[in-house]
Image (cartoon, rainbow, N blue to C red):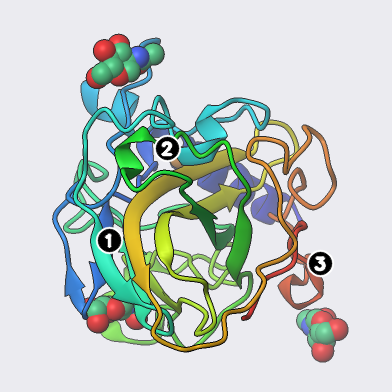
Amino acid sequence: MKSSMLFILGATFLGHVNGHYTFGRFIFDSKWSKTWEYVRQISPDKTIKDADIAFVAPNTEPASLDLRCGRNASIAWSRPNTATIKAGDTVGFAAGEPRLTGTDVARIYHPGFASAWLSKSPTDDLNLYTGDGDWFKILSVTGRTEQSLDFSAPENKKLYDQFKAIWGTFNVQSWNFTVPKTTPPGKYLLRFEHIFPNPQDSQFYVNCAHVDIVNTNSNFGTPAPLVKIPGIYTRGQKDVYFDHFDLNFNVTQFVAPKPVVWTG
Ligand SMILES: *[C@@H]1O[C@H](CO)[C@@H](O)[C@H](O)[C@H]1NC(C)=O
Ligand SMILES: *[C@@H]1O[C@H](CO)[C@@H](O)[C@H](O)[C@H]1NC(C)=O
Ligand SMILES: *[C@@H]1O[C@H](CO)[C@@H](O)[C@H](O)[C@H]1NC(C)=O
Ligand SMILES: [Cu+2]
């Protein structure tokens, strides 16, 4: 009992030093873009001295505007490119630079759950859209899937952690998902979110890509449920703020917070 407690504390503190990340790279047409090529660049956290840590430091305030697209990115001041994709395509996000000191590639270093969201821009110029409209969810990842890291592979053994590896996205570099086939065409913000749950300050890792969704089908779906961001989470809610560094935590029984996924 005692040694497992020490292990838990060690693992938690290590993660809080600089094990943060951003999702600066968008994946489409099976190719990885450069950091901030298609994703709105974020600003550093001005309260942190170390430049790299200031950049990747998470948001811990669910009511903040930064929950929408990351720090200072509800305004598209970096003017990223817009990726043209088709409804039904597989796309993805990857962790970008800067990465954790001493690691070869950027990864989702923390345990937790991921999701992807769309919000249609009312204007043709995505740079002018602040994301204050409606959002719907198109992906939810909790436990392990076929995309999760194979920790039995020799090169991944050092990345394993008994308490963290139960989460599907733990230590992956990227995550892919399908844009629903019946998504109405238009210019959208595509938001990727990873939450590192904690009893107090859960960490929100969020970024938004600019996408132009083409759909040549005649029937489009009606995305639902629609929500505003911020407004999806309240500090302290049980499915966002909890302790999972516990052998009794069963990720299979974990239900991701609302809203549910729109599958098209
Ligand atoms: C996501 O797709 C890209 C491009 O096809 C691929 O390189 C990457 O390995 C995929 N990620 C995962 C976790 O499967
Ligand atoms: C937001 O970004 C703009 C453009 O880069 C910058 O001038 C401003 O200082 C940033 N604000 C914050 C709070 O980081
Ligand atoms: C976790 O929950 C699932 C679904 O209820 C169950 O099948 C599984 O046996 C549980 N695992 C453990 C280790 O209790
Ligand atoms: Cu972190």
Residue matched to label 2: 129
Residue 163 appearing in the image: no
Q: Nearer the viewer, mark 2 or mark 3?
A: 2
The quadrant of the rendered image in which ligand 3 is seen is bottom right
Earlier along the polypeptide chain: callout 2 or callout 3?
A: 2
Instruction: From the viewer's side, name the closer residue of 5 and 144.
Output: 144
- The kind of residue tagged 2 is Tyr
Q: Which mark is residue 26?
A: 1
- Looking at the image, which is closer to me, 127 or 8? 127
Left or right, 261 with respect to 235, comes to left
Going from the N terminus, do you reach mark 2 or mark 1 first? 1
Task: Look at label 3 and name its amino acid.
Answer: Asn
Q: Residue at x 37, y 66 (%)?
A: 159
- Rounded to the nearest angstrom, the CA distance separating label 2 from label 1 is 19 Å
Q: Which residue is mark 3?
A: 248
Q: Quadrant of residue 255?
A: bottom right
- SS label for mark 3: loop
Dot 3 alpha-carbon crowd within 10 angstroms: few under 14, some 14 to 19, many 20 or more: few
Q: How far, Cα to Cα, is label 1 from label 3? A: 36 Å
Residue 214 in view: yes
Total numbered labels placed on residues in the image: 3
Q: Amino acid at mark 1?
A: Phe
Name the spot of residue 4 as percent of width and height, x first. Answer: 67, 56
**Residue 164 in the image: above or below residue 67:** below
In the image, the residue with mark 2 has its CB under 8 Å from the nearest atom of ligand 2: no
Horizontal side of residue 238 vs 135, given as left or right: right
Which quadrant would residue 125 be assigned to in this image? top left
Q: Residues within 10 Å of mark 1 (few under 14, many from 20)?
A: many
